[in-house]
Image (cartoon, rainbow, N blue to C red):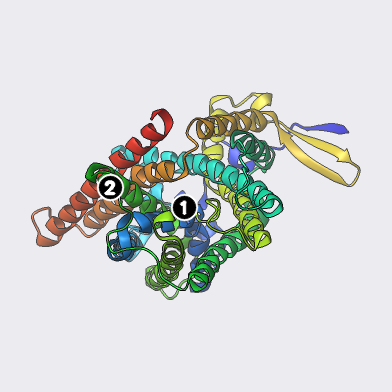
């Protein structure tokens, strides 16, 4: 195996002078690649980002809320997310939402240019928490799916009443080792193939989960469940379970964070915001339909016995090969999804090191590994060290708190309000120069406060769920 040093080649995202086209002015934007996206490519990007592991917890959430509150809650969250992106449509160009001249190609750029550095600092914390939480959840979910594949085969061989218990920690470690390897992909442009695979897998397991639920309903010959949802031993316990359910639903719906990046890919005319409003309606309808099917069929199939994770809770035993395939799709999707949410963190930290240590060979120098004469790949020691440490920390946290529904609930609640509600509303009011005493401004403030109360309730209930699961 050969090791060749490339002293003059720097990775683009480590260059301290590198500026992405998304954060540049209108002049810089003209120098960027031509925008060729249309409503169909935008729709594909959004649906790929939204339909993820959160869909697997929706049947459990529906079970806590019941047949009336469950679907209504999903529709309300869908409407809140749609309102958010309608507001963000006006934030793509600044200072004027119609003519710009500046383009805001990512969420954080828009907050900084419209609301200022102080708000951008708080928004940056929320965005980073969002990326980190997804890494933890994807580790937990992947381990559950690996565990479920082994259990499914065990139940098929030894019968449904067999004791098939497997420790989840080793599967988390396996997933972490996979991520250590995949994380060495230098940056986003080199990840297109991984994103395509992840998109196909997410659709596949969502459809399989819905189909298995429908098949189970037909087999049962009845629709299970009730108006009030799963009964609890005490009223207080019911209140906390409802809070967790709200957090789970909050995790599944939003796509505000990637919205402006998708809008930045669109060609004009027609104006980008017109296209994105149309795309947003289509995306919300498609994802809400998928979620109602997955959550509704799952609850109808199992009623009060609805598992926390539709594909790993073993409501479905047969056909075991289809359950295995669906869980394999979950794992493949999350391998790619983990990188989609981790690469921005990697790029940001590595750019900081590049600026801090401009002459460091450890930070800047690439090495070409040639394990075979026909195969070679680039290795950077800074990238290897930092990304391995990051994956190890995320894996460690997942091992400490391997509780799917509770952690998903916390994750959904912790960033929903600032990213989906507060910042879009404030940017809209600022862009439109709406005075604080005007009725529209008052309506928006009431809207944000109501959402804050609901999300705080979901957050507290989900935190309690994690504590009870860990120490109870």
Q: From the viewer's perspective, tell me whether residue 173 is left or right of residue 433.
A: right
In percent of width and height, residue 324 lies at: 65, 56
Residue at x-position 55% and y-position 53%: 314
Q: Which residue is mark 1?
A: 307
Residue appearing at x 50%, y 73% in the figure: 218
Q: Is residue 159 visible?
A: yes
Which element carries disc 2, helix, strand or loop?
helix
Position of residue 257 measured from the top left corner of the image (x, y, whole percent): 41, 52
Q: Which residue is mark 2?
A: 238
The residue carrying pointer 1 sits among few (fewer than 14), some (14 to 19) or many (20 or more) residues within 10 Å by Cα, namely many
Q: Quadrant of the N terminus?
A: top right
Drawn side of residue 26 relative to residue 219, left or right: left
Mark 2 surroundings: few (<14), some (14-19) or many (≥20) residues within 10 A: some
Give above or below for 264 relative to 233. Answer: below
Of 176 and 209, the residue lying toward us:
209
Q: Is residue 351 shown left or right of residue 154?
A: left
Using residue 78 as the reference point, say whether residue 346 is left or right of it. right
The numbered disc on residue 186 is none
């Amino acid at each position: 195996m050969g090791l060749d040093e490339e002293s003059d080649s720097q990775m683009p995202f480590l260059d301290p002078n590198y500026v992405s086209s998304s954060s540049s002015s209108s002049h810089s934007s003209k120098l960027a690649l031509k925008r060729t996206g249309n409503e169909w490519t935008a729709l594909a990007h959004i649906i790929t980002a939204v339909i993820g592991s959160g869909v697997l917890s929706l049947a459990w959430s529906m079970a806590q809320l019941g047949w009336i509150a469950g679907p209504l809650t999903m529709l309300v969250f869908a409407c809140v997310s749609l309102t958010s992106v309608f507001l963000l449509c006006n934030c793509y160009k600044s200072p004027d939402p119609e003519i710009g001249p500046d383009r805001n190609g990512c969420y954080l750029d828009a907050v900084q240019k419209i609301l200022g550095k102080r708000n951008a600092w708080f928004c940056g914390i929320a965005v980073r928490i969002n990326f980190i939480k997804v890494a933890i959840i994807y580790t937990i979910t992947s381990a559950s799916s690996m565990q479920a594949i082994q259990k499914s085969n065990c139940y098929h061989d030894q019968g449904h009443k067999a004791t098939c218990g497997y420790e989840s920690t080793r599967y988390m470690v396996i997933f972490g080792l996979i991520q250590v390897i995949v994380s060495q992909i230098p940056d986003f442009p080199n990840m297109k193939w991984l994103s395509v695979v992840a998109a196909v897998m997410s659709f596949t397991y969502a459809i399989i989960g819905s189909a298995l639920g429908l098949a189970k309903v037909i087999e049962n010959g009845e629709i299970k469940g009730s108006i009030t949802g799963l009964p609890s031993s005490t009223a207080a316990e019911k209140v906390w379970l409802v809070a967790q359910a709200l957090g789970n639903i909050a995790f599944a719906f939003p796509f505000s964070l990637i919205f402006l990046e998708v809008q930045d890919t669109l060609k004009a005319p027609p104006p980008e915001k017109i296209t994105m409003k149309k795309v947003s309606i289509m995306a919300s309808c498609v994802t809400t339909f998928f979620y109602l099917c997955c959550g509704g069929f799952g609850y109808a199939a199992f009623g009060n016995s609805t598992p926390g994770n539709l594909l790993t809770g073993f409501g479905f035993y047969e056909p075991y090969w289809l359950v295995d395939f669906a869980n394999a799709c979950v794992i493949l999707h999350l391998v790619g999804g983990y990188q989609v949410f981790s690469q921005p963190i990697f790029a940001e930290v590595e750019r900081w090191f590049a600026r801090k240590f401009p002459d460091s060979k450890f930070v800047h120098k690439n090495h070409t590994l040639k394990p075979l004469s026909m195969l070679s790949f680039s290795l950077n020691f800074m990238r290897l060290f930092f990304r391995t440490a990051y994956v190890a920390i995320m894996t460690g946290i997942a091992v400490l708190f391997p509780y799917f529904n509770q952690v998903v609930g916390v994750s959904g609640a912790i960033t929903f309000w600032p990213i989906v509600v507060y910042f879009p509303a404030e940017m809209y009011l600022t862009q439109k120069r709406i005075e604080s005493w005007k009725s529209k401004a008052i309506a928006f403030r009431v809207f944000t406060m109501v959402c804050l109360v609901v999300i705080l309730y979901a957050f507290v209930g989900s935190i309690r769920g994690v504590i009870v699961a860990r120490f109870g």
